[in-house]
Each structure stands twice: as C-alpha cells, then as structure tokens.
Image (tube, rainbow, N blue to C red):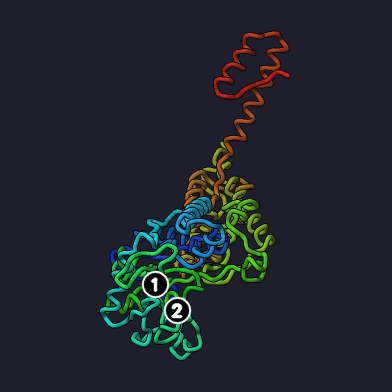
Amino acid sequence: MNVYSTMSRQKEPLKVENNKIKLFVCGPTVYDYSHIGHARTYISFDVIVRYLKHEGYSVFYLQNITDIDDKIINRAKERGEDPLELAHKFEAEYIKDMETLNVKNVNFYARATEHMQEIIDQIQDLIDKGYAYDTPTGVYFDVSKFESFGKLSNRNLDDLQNTRIEVDTTKKDPKDFALWKKQDEGPYWDSPWGNGRPGWHIEDTAITESYFGPQYDIHGGGLDLIFPHHDAEIAQMEAASGKEPLVQYWMHTGFLNVRGEKMSKSLGNFITIKELLKDYEPDVYRFFVLSTHYRSPIDFSDDILKQAENSLKRIQNTAKLVVAQQENDNLPQDDECSIIDDLESFRSEFFDAMNNDFNTPIALSSLFDFTHKLNKVIADNQVSAESLALIVDTLKEVESIFGFTIIVEDDASESSDELLNILTDVRSQLRADKNWDLADKIRDDLAALDINLEDK
Ligand code: AMP
C-alpha cells in the first residue's frame, strides 16, 4: 500500500511495525456547530481508517478536542456564556454529527483542558533544553534554536520573516510562537510561569506524547494546518525528545469550497452539518466526499450533491436487483455469462485504487462499471446462486469500507403499514358482516400494541 506524505511530497510504501498504526488527526476547535468542511476531512480519515483495518492493520485513532482557545473565549463573551460550558456543548454536537455521518472509528477524543499537566511538563522540558523562554506575557518557542523549522511546509526562516505569526513585543523574534499565554481572566490554569492557558500548538504534542510517545506513525489534518500548526508541532516534539521524525507519514486533506468560494459566514455560504442533513442523507454526503480524492480540493453545490444522490441510488438499485434475484427459483445452475471474471477485475481495480493512496474516486468508478454489467446479466437471468452470493459479499465489503449503504434493507415500517391496511380492511368486512366479536378483538389486540383504531 502506498501513502502520500506531505513531508516527502511523494507516495511512500506504508511500513509499520507489527501492522500496528498510531494515528493522530487534529480535532475541531469547538466554538460553533461543525460545518461541511470538517465533515469532508473527518469522513476522509474515517474511510482511510476503515480501509487500513480492512487490510489487517490494527489502528489506534486519537483525536484532540481544542476546548480552550481565543475563538471559544470570544464566542462565549458574545453570548454571555461560560467558555468551557460552551466548548463542551459544541463538542457534544460535533460527536453527534460524526455519529450521524457514520464516522465512528475514533478510539479516543482527548480534550486539551484535561491534559494541562502534560502540556505544562512539555513546556518546562523545552525551557530546560533551551528551546523556549519566559517573558512577562508568556512562554515562547525560540524558532532560531530549531534549525529545520518549517521543513514540512518547505518554508525557510527568511520566508517566515514576512509572516506575522503572532504580534507581541515581548518576543525575541516575531516568528517565535506561544507555548503558554499568561492571563488572569477567563479560564486559566496555574503554572510555574504564572496563571494562563496553553498556546494553540502545544496541546497536540502533549497529547500525542502521552498516548503514543515522542514518535508515531501517521498525523493527519486539513491542508490549512500544515503551516504554522504542524511545523510548530514538529519543532516542539523533536526539540523536546531529540528524536526525529515526529511521524512517518503526514496526511493532509484538500479544502472544501462552496460553489467555488471559500466557506465563510460573511459570504453567507457557511453550511453546518446539521443544515446539510436537512436536505441530504448522510450517505449522499459520504458518497460526494468519496467521489473526489482526499488530497484534492472539493467543491460543494446542490447540483453536485444531486448528482451524488442519483449515482448512489443507481448503485443501490442494482444491489436491490441482485438481492431480489437470490429469491428467484429459476436461477441457472451455472453462470451463463462472464460475471465472475468481471467481479474479479472489479475487485482488483478497486483494491489497486485503494492501495494507491486511498484513491476512492477510481474505486467508485470501477464499482459503477461493475454495476452496469450486473444490471444486464441479472435482467437476463444469467447468474447462478453461487455467484450471486459472492457478488453480495463483495458489495457488503465495499459498504463496510466506504461506510455508506449499498444494500438497502426493505423498509420495515413500510411493510408494517401495509399489514395494518390489510387488518383494517378485514375488520371493516367483519363489521359489515356484523361479526362484532371478531372486529372488537382485532381492535382490542391492536390497542394493546398502542395502535388505536377509531370507527368514524
Ligand atoms: P478547526 O475546527 O478549524 O480547527 O478544523 C478542524 C479540522 O477540519 C482541521 O483538520 C481543518 O483542516 C479541517 N477543516 C476546516 N475547514 C475545512 C474545509 N473547509 N475543508 C476541509 N477541511 C476543513
């Protein structure tokens, strides 16, 4: 299996010890409802994890929750709420949204505020080793001490000179970034350098060090995090541990835009997951996300979502035909077509694509080609029971990797509605025949099931 790493800017064979993978993906800053851009990133990693597991890797998937940050504090001020309560309310909403989207593989969500001691210990370690210094406003990482700073984004220190990361006159150099921000207002924690709260980057390395140690396998996030966030993480952890690399593979998802523009509240094109799900099924959104490679930008529009809806429906309709065909009493003993060869070619195209840096759009298009072939041979009743079973197994396998429904179960509520209609018709006939006892018995038995019939 080949995986593209942002560090080497190329695909590399995936090599891990004992098939065990430690994966960390940056979680959200919880100051509002999560949006469809978050969903793009987290669905992509969900499918990556599903596929790694399918291929026999055992994956521990860790995500942090940024539950203390300027955005949270500002939003709480605007709303007159307690910042931590606000953060934890939106964290719960985020987790609900992920469950609805069938994003279910995170093993542990680690809140920044629950790792304060680990954060303080790591900052102290960096001070002791000469990589960080204390000022009246905070503790800062001295980027001049870490020679390879910027190696992930490929920016050198001269480029950084022009990037105002954080303005603060107490810093030795504008490029230095905060590890600890001193303050006595709002949520703050006690530390050897005075009351305050952590900078943006340190929570991630403090959390990953405590669960994974100083080095691990894969770190993921959206493209926007490469600089300065991930470069800062590398500097912090490699400086503190003296070991490199921090991670073997850096994976970044492309950005989601809405109708060609960056999503933003001021442009009025900001869509939360909850709003999205009023119009589209979670499966449709997953299908839409997977129709583009995870590293490419993706454009959201109603037209594209409608196309995704139709394409998914077509695949589900074919799957329905296959399942229904299994009930056919007149199936041929042996296949009267080459569907098993087609199944084999589909499987090999599908898995080649997934092994090639999780190329879901190619895998999906091979699924499409295969379903076209299926439609014809099923309609002509050319497929044996044995082959139908193999096809259903493969469709279920694909379903478990992509995390959307391919084989739609018959809607139980639809069939129970039909049964009720039959019962009420029979009862009307009984009443017409003046068979009151039996008609009443039906009404009473239904009432015991909380179904109340009214004769009007
Ligand atoms: P945030 O809550 O902004 O810290 O973002 C959490 C994760 O979602 C990060 O990995 C971001 O890169 C990712 N993300 C945020 N906005 C988008 C977007 N429009 N498209 C794709 N990923 C996004």
Q: What is the distance, in whole Å, between disc 2 and disc 1 at their CAs? A: 41 Å
Regarding residue 376, the answer to whether it shows in the image is: no
Q: Position of residue 2 (x, y in %)?
A: 42, 71
What residue sits 33% from the left and 86% below the top? 145
Q: Residue furthest bottom?
A: 158
Nearer-N-terminus badge (2/1): 2
Q: Which of 50/447 is in front? A: 447
Q: Which of 258/248 is in front? A: 258
**Marking on residue 12:** none
Q: Position of residue 42 (x, y in %)?
A: 49, 61
Asked whether, in this view, residue 397 is left or right of residue 145, the answer is right
In the image, residue 126 above or below residue 442: below
* Label 2 neighbour load within 10 Å: few <14, some 14-19, many 20+: few
Quadrant where the C terminus sits is top right
Residues at badges 2 and 1 in contact (C-beta under 8 Å)?
A: no
**Marking on residue 182:** 1
What residue sits 68% from the left and 60% below the top? 302
Q: Secondary structure at mark 2?
A: strand
Quarter assignment of residue 109 = bottom left
Q: Which residue is mark 2?
A: 10
Asked whether, in this view, residue 191 is left or right of residue 168, the answer is left
Asked whether, in this view, residue 132 is left or right of residue 31, the answer is left
Q: Secondary structure at mark 1?
A: strand
- Mark nearest the camera among 2 and 1 is 1
Q: Position of residue 282 (x, y in %)?
A: 57, 53
Q: Position of residue 239 (x, y in %)?
A: 31, 79
In the image, residue 180 above or below residue 210: below
